[in-house]
Image: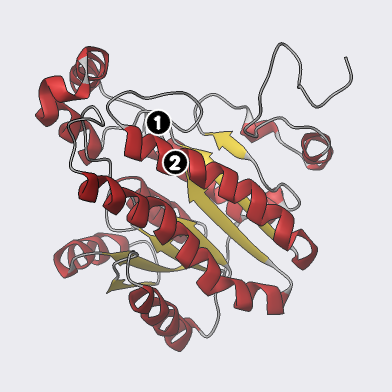
Amino acid sequence: MKLRDKVAIIIGGSRGIGKAVAKAFLKEGAKVAIAARTGVDIDIALKDLSIEGQVIGTITDVSKEQDIQNLLEYTLRKYKTMDILVNAAGIQGPIGPLAEVNISEWIDNIHINLIGTVRCCKAVLPIMMSKKRGKIINFSGGGATSPRPNFSAYACSKAAIVRFTETLAMEVKDYGIDVNAVAPGAVNTRMLNEIIKAGEKAGEKELSEAIERSKKGGNSPEMAAGLAVFLASEDSDGLTGRLISAVWDDWKTFDDKTIVEINRSSIYTLRRIDGRNYMEKK
């Protein structure tokens, strides 16, 4: 088992990709604490996940710093330590052109997706730094690496998460803490239904793709969960500050030599390109 006796906190672990990650971690021997915004979601998830292993859960609103602190304290009371943080919570709205959306909803998106991720990372850093070891896995999403009209808040928050991941990785690299981001691909979750419900506000391209995906099925959340297991395990030690695609990147072949080569390059990072990396000699 790749994660035997490791303790993982999974934000957004009650459903969708977060729940798939929780289940995969449990199967690999981890002890898991899931966080979600409603008790109903937690209760339903715990009933399912407890079949796989040792799991606890508590109501957590990542936009509230005290909730995050309560989650950490609860985890430490139950498991005595923690090793892995997965930030898989997020919201997609508001959907529509910036000129038409509610700015308060736009700001809420940033508070939950970006600031919530930052707060959770900051909360666990003292523990990881004292242990000289830790794994942090943040989730990116559509719009992080290319424009996404009518989803400006989501795109901005996810792009910011990637750059935050790269920056934090540099800050804590001397403490044995690896920080990476996962691009899960188009997965059939509640966000897909939100796009369909938004209709023309989502834009013709987004709407047609969402309808098509709802009929044929999107990428499996288990693909992202498998990548999360790799990034949480010793197999990925030293790989840090990268955005890895669960669908398109050949992460299953990464070995120690590959990780060294990746870390020496700017691959899997946000960067401007013109056929070659602009910072490199031409």
Secondary element under disc 2, as helix, strand or loop, is: helix
- Which label number is shown at residue 115? none
Q: Are marks 2 and 1 in contact (CB under 8 Å)?
A: yes
The percent coordinates of residue 123 (x first, y second) are 51, 73
Q: Residue shown at 76%/59% (left/top)?
A: 173
Within 10 Å of the Cα at label 1, are there few (<14), some (14-19), or many (20+) other Cα atoms? some
Q: Please name the residue that numbered disc 1 is placed on.
A: 142
Quadrant of the rendered image containing residue 223: top left
- Which label number is shown at residue 158? 2
Q: Residue 15, can we see it?
A: yes
The percent coordinates of residue 50 (x first, y second) are 31, 67
Q: Is residue 51 left or right of residue 139?
A: left
The percent coordinates of residue 183 (x first, y second) are 48, 36
Which badge, 2 or 1, comes first in the chain's sequence? 1
Q: Residue furthest right?
A: 281
Looking at the picture, does residue 42 appear above or below residue 237? below
Amino acid type at image mark 2: Lys
Quadrant of the rendered image containing residue 256: top right
Q: Residue shown at 77%/35% (left/top)?
A: 262
